[in-house]
Image: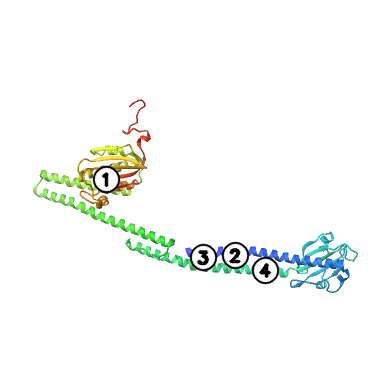
Amino acid sequence: MSTRLRSVVASAVATLLAVALLGAVVDVLVARHLHRALDHTLRARAVEVAQLAASAPALLTAPGALDSPVGATQALVEVVDSRGRIVARSLSLGGRVLSPALAAPALSGRGAYVSAELGSTDLRVYAAPLAATGHVAGGGAVLVAASTADLADTIGAVEALTLLGAVAAALVGAAAVWFLMGRALRPLVRLDRAAAEIGRTGDPRRRLPDPHRPDEVGRLAATLNAMLETLDRARENERRFVADASHELRTPLTALRGNVEHLARHGVSPELVADLQADAERLARLADDLLALSREDAAAAPGEEVRLDDLAREAAADAVEAEPVLVRGDREALERAVRNLVENARRHGTGAVTVRVEAGDGVARLEVRDEGPGVADSERERVFERFHGRGSGLGLAIVRATAERHGGRAYARGARFTIELPAVRKASENGRHPSGEKREKGLP
């Protein structure tokens, strides 16, 4: 079943159950009210007959004296004496007689409601005691009955109306949900068709249609379009990366091929051997950088604890200013990143190269600086792009990829190149000496 059809069925069933439940409650309340009204009428008529028996007992036997309407029918009235013998009865009874057993509660001195049958007619009967006076019915009882057919018909009509209302409400609700779901799902249908077309063509430059709605569908379209834009940028970056890598590889390969041809024609020479070695080293370095960058893009989150101050001392810088700092990371990748920063400072900077490590506010910073002017503000972001600048152009790109994989960042300000990573704690707080060795008790 489609989402639209499931919603319609669910709404129809829910509406039907809700209206049916409400109708059942109404039926109960209406039935209770009608029964109470009938009981009140029967009791009131019984009181009138009892008063008549006490004040004018001779009128009990007068024709029509006991007849009175109860709703759309006539009340059935019967008066019995203390022995249960019939003294008087209403003309509405005709040749019928109410069972004397119905008067038993009243003859014992208390009024009572009972249900009975008179032929095929269901009756509601109220039996009331009569005062013990000198007249013939003294100490007896009066029975007042009425048919419950009209009451049952009314309750049946209410139940039928409730059922009809429940079905009608369910149909109206289903139609409304069908219409509303059709309007709500129409943008999703367009999004589905557009997404299928993008998947068929494989063109991430295409975008899904904007439904221009401030609801969940509009936000979904915006999110998917943002995802497509990100994929498009990633695809463009990969395309540019492949082109740049091909360009970088072409230069040493061309030189290497030329030197090999020269070797084949003119023989070997010390200068030619040196050129071949330089070209081979450049190719090897570029291959290593490409492999390292691909590993950074696909590597998992690091988990071991690494001393940044140890890495700073191992980086072969001219000066090191480091306090003991621990980070959670990949030691080999961090070593390469620090080494790349130092090599970049030596290659493009001037003067002494200094490495500084510090921690504060939960952030560990490793800074490499030289004494030159550094990069211009307009180049601060571009220097970390792939194949930017001289050499392989991947050293700083690897630094940024490593920092981001470790949950940090890399940035440049002038001649200062910095890696920021989440700090675990200072090594001295872990019971370790800054040199990396535990002190023995009693030794300096």
**Residue 8, numbered label:** 3
> What kind of residue is marked 2?
Val
* Residue ID at (58%, 65%): 16
Quarter of the picture holding the C terminus: top left
Name the spot of residue 340 as percent of width and height, x first.
25, 44
* Mark 1, residue position: 417
Q: Which comes before the other along the chain, label 1 or label 2?
A: 2
* Residue ID at (80%, 61%): 111
Mark 3 or mark 2, whichever is nearer to me: 2
- Distance of label 3 from label 2 (alpha carbons): 16 Å
> What kind of residue is marked 4?
Gly
Tell me if residue 25 can be seen: yes
Q: Which comes before the other along the chain, label 4 or label 2?
A: 2
* Label 3 CA crowd tier, 10 Å (few <14, some 14–19, many 20+): many
Q: Which comes before the other along the chain, label 3 or label 4?
A: 3
Mark 1 or mark 2, whichever is nearer to me: 1
> What kind of residue is marked 3?
Val
* Label 4 CA crowd tier, 10 Å (few <14, some 14–19, many 20+): some
Q: Compare residues 218 and 187 and report the one nearer the observer.
A: 218
- Distance of label 1 from label 4 (alpha carbons): 89 Å
- Distance of label 1 from label 2 (alpha carbons): 72 Å
> What kind of residue is marked 1?
Phe
Name the spot of residue 193 as percent of width and height, x first.
39, 65
Name the spot of residue 119 as percent of width and height, x first.
78, 69
* Mark 4, residue position: 156
